[in-house]
Image: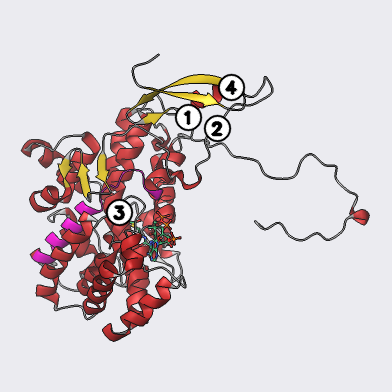
Amino acid sequence: MPKEALSILDQRTHSTYEIPTHDGTIRAMDLRQMKTGPEDFGLMTYDPAFMNTASCRSSITFIDGDKGILRYRGYPIEQLAEKCTFLEVAYLILFGELPTAPQLKEWVAEITHHTMLHETTKKFLEGFRYDAHPMGMLTSTVAALSTVYPEARHVLDPTVRALEIKRLIGKMPTIAAYTYRHSLGYPYVYPDNDFSYSENFMNMLWKMAEPKYQPNPIMARALDILFILHADHEQNCSANAMRAVGSSQADPFLSTAAACAALSGPLHGGANEEVLKMLDVIGSKDKVPAYMDKVKAGEFKLMGFGHRIYKNYDPRARIIKWAADKVFEVTGRNAKLDIALELERIALEDDYFVKRKLYPNVDFYSGIMYQAMGFKPEIFTVLFAIPRTAGWLAQWQELITDPEQKIARPRQVYIGEGARDVVPMENRVVVAPHPAA
Ligand code: ACO
């Protein structure tokens, strides 16, 4: 018997099995040997939404949701946010170690030289309707990059992978800024290599007729911190989409587009936009208690609250609150902050939220800060996608180089009809639609 194992008695057959455990897990495939007879397929696990299933072994991001701990490659998020730039952190996430000064110089130069979009990609963006949602534009344009760089499909070639990683990290802010300018009807601004990653993004967003844009250093640093906080978050919905699509050896542009699509949903990265809409609906601080009553009655969710993993204050929300205060020193206080603070105050005291361990998540304060910086809510999720690209690519690279991984293909428990014959049209009768239809 292995040192660490479970003894399982199958009551159906009175057989006993020794199932080894590793790192607090059992291998689901070890259950397959448990059969009721030769015709039996073998035991499977049933885990909708992957509530208790590890889909990979990863060394990128560590989260302790009960203690509110987040670390990239072992470094606490608080230290990274205080001491590093986003591109330093992206390097760390992708390559496992913080860069030395020469490594960082080379990395920054390479990313900076991949910020430009092919003119056909710019034209592609011009084709969207004036009111197209920026996340839809971003997702489609990232997918379209696959047509510009067809060699990206050689995903098993490390040199190709390294190049496409730099291209994607370099081009995401450019595409994001173009989607923003497009929605405003402004002309596109080309990247400026004199600037840092976040300064250049601000330049592409907000430069108008002036010969040289002057980014506000406090805002640029705040944006960089926001990018650090959003860079990775282990096996979340979009990282899982990246890995699932990447497991078919689709190219990284298409896999990243899938991850963007997953991020766009209101239960995931789309929540920051929803928070602002919610604060608009509430309108003023005195209306908060009545709104909370409706949340507790199950009419809707409190957006920006709750998390699958964090059952404590999301450490990123704490840092965002701090960064938001810095931004407000420049921009003036966002009036919505009072409503948000009141929501948080009530939620942290109210039994409904306390019992369910619902705390503010990363999206709760980021939107208020983004709005103070001059962004419209529609662009908030795009701001999330820019830095998360580093995390998606690190997850993808880990997947591609992991000998244990194969094409992702979950099992199902079939609950439909048994075999039946097709009835001729004239004999068919109307039946109630299936509940899933
Ligand atoms: N407001 C009110 N009640 C909530 C909320 C909320 N925001 N979140 C969860 N609950 C309740 C659920 O109704 C459920 O109550 P019940 O036990 O009485 O049925 C209980 O808390 C557990 O919630 P689940 O939905 O089972 O938790 P799950 O882990 O599946 O969902 C999620 C996590 C999707 C983040 C959820 O909390 C939510 O929808 N939050 C609002 C959207 C949001 O802010 N998303 C951003 C998450 S961070 C990110 O992705 C970047």
Residue drawn where x is 26% and y is 52% of the image? 387
Residue drawn where x is 14% and y is 54% of the image? 196
- Quarter of the render that holds ligand 1: bottom left
Instruction: Report, in whole angstroms, how far the alpha carbon at label 3 lies from the one at label 1.
Output: 26 Å
Instruction: Report, in whole angstroms, how far the alpha carbon at label 4 lies from the one at label 1.
Output: 20 Å
Label 2: how many Cα within 10 Å (few below 14, some 14–19, many 20+): some
Q: Amino acid at mark 1?
A: Ala
Q: Which residue is mark 4?
A: 14
Q: Which residues are magenta?
A: 218-237
Between 51 and 142, the one lying in front of the other is 51
Q: Amino acid at mark 3?
A: Lys
Instruction: Report, in whole angstroms, how far the alpha carbon at label 2 lies from the one at label 1.
Output: 7 Å
Magenta-span inclusion, residue 230: yes
Say which label, 3 or 1, has the lower sequence index: 1
The image position of residue 424, as x and y in percent, is 91, 50
Q: Which residue is mark 3?
A: 311
Say which label, 4 or 1, has the lower sequence index: 4
Say which label, 2 or 3, has the lower sequence index: 2
